[in-house]
Amino acid sequence: MTAATLLPYDEVLARFDPVLGLEVHVELNTKTKMFCGCVNEFGGEPNTHVCPTCLGLPGSLPVVNGKGVESAIRIGLALNCQIAEWCRFARKNYFYPDMPKNFQTSQYDEPIAFDGYLDVMLDDGEVFRVGIERAHMEEDTGKSLHVGGATGRIHGAEHSLLDYNRAGVPLIEIVTKPIEGAGERAPEVARAYVTALRELMLALGVSDVRMDQGSMRCDANVSLRPKGQQEFGTRTETKNVNSLRSVERAVRYEMQRQAAVLADGGTIVQETRHFQEADGSTSPGRPKETSEDYRYFPEPDLVPIAPSREWVEELRKTLPEPPWKRRKRIQEEWQLTDEELRDLFNTGAVDLVAATVDAGAPVAEARSWWVQFLTQQANAREVELAELAITPKQVARVIELIAEGKLTNKLARQVVEAVLDGEGGPDEVIEARGLQVVSDDSALLAAVDEALAAQPDVVEKIRGGKVQAAGAIVGAVMKATRGQADAKRVRELVLERCK
Amino acid sequence: MSTISRDEVAHLAKLARLAVTEDELDLFAGQLDVILDAVAKVSEVATDDVPPTSHAVPLTNVFREDEVRPGLTQEQALSGAPAAEEGRFRVPRILGEEQ
């Protein structure tokens, strides 16, 4: 595939104004699927989380999961939306085999939530308001495996294999209004919006929002219009952009690609494009179908949903603090710079740090452990930070042991690694491995005297005023104590002995 | 009097995956017109204060508890499939219809 021509970003902005539209799908973390009692769980042996209803077998009837509706309403309220007094499900008809029923149960012109907004904080602390068009309920599709194609993609495949474990999993699709006026910050706004949405879902506790596992997925619509023009240009929809960073890259790429086409006198084809994670480009997919082609009609097997105003108000009381307000509060309470705040959120450490602080650790230490050492460990072990086998309470205990002088930083890292490896809690690891700091001066002095006796020439140098030579003795003592001595204290003792 | 064009019939046939001959395009266009006209008669008597009916029973908010119920085994799930492979339903290759 030949690479598309890209216009330099500055030139894009000099000539065009970007308009974005973001569609985010969030899988709910209910125990069961949206319309049947099958377990809602990621993975599993193929076709083992299925029943006659989600397989679309004759005679089966769907029944709505009340918890799914509750989550949808809470999401709608958190996005400052109106909640429909009455709405229905609709059938979206198509022949692609990812749904065994030949249709997907969705909502069409009567979404459960509509007309809202989400305020998102940009990297410099500025708050940008993203309008929300709607949030509607639907079901996820099955997973296709294309066999025989060179890249596992559909093109060139001989046949496809379907696993319907995911078919029927509750899904909320959240659609923004056209995002205008972001200008050069459009890619950043896109990332900040998806980030804020992710934080909001976590705070609501309605989804585990794992972009790597597909429980949160983003489609990015991008169009350009010449500066000064009101009318929107033709848009493309880039599908399945599956990380926060990719959202930003995909928007930026499409802006540059479309600008190059338009600047050359060409026209944009309205189409679906695929994001290529490897090089951050997008490649053409199918031409976009119009919604008429899906021949939506009200789902006859499901009765309408009419949430009472009392229920809606009850649910409103359960809403968490809005993401940008939470950020502001945390920044003030913990006295963080913009950059520190960004790292805290980008690493996904904020809740873990908060829990560690609650367990008694000072903010600075708690933050440093999670954002630095533990984030490195999570990356090395290829898991999410929250999945590491260590609890905030255990991290707080390690920090406490350092403060008490019972662990050096180096020893503490060994202890934490052992905890991550499943060797038990910090105190157990210290006990089992004998990792206590040697803080007893008499034990240290014996080691110091031994090292001094072994290197009389160094002793002479120190006595002659070359204090930096003490390093050799400190090194020998640390080696003799297997790193369990406090190097600072050893140095003090060495200098005292050489007086 | 509605008028369904040959092109519209061809488009609908394509969406429904039906193979329709040239002669049938004209035949079905005429038949669909008759059906649409019949439905249009309902609109004549339905005034603005009569909402379209989608459900015959006046029920709302029929919900299920979020409790797991046993489903099918993989073997049961695939028992009616014309073809299966690696525990999955095997289907012919799909051309240009990726969702």
Image (cartoon, rainbow, N blue to C red):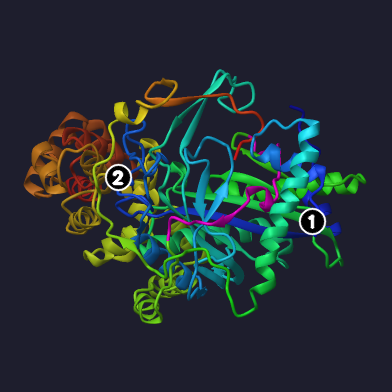
Tag 1, which secondary structure?
strand
A297 vs A478, nearest the viewer: A297
Q: Is residue B81 visible?
A: yes
Q: Amino acid at mark 1?
A: Leu
Span colored in magenta: A279-302
Q: Looking at the picture, tell me which residue is in the foreground, A454 or B80.
A: B80
Q: Is residue A342 visible?
A: no
- Disc 2: CA contacts within 10 A as few (<14), some (14-19) or many (>=20): some
Rendered location of residue B5, percent (x, y): 82, 47
Residue topped by disc 2:
A388
Callout 1 touching callout 2 (CB < 8 Å): no
**Residue identified by numbered label 1:** A224
Residue A288 vertical placement versus A17 (above, below): above
Q: Position of residue A319 (x, y in %)?
A: 38, 73
Snapshot quadrant of residue B95: top right
Give the position of the N terminus of chain B as an image quadrant. bottom right
Q: Nearer the viewer, mark 1 or mark 2?
A: 1
How crowded pointer 1 is (Cα within 10 Å; few <14, some 14-19, many 20+) is rated as many
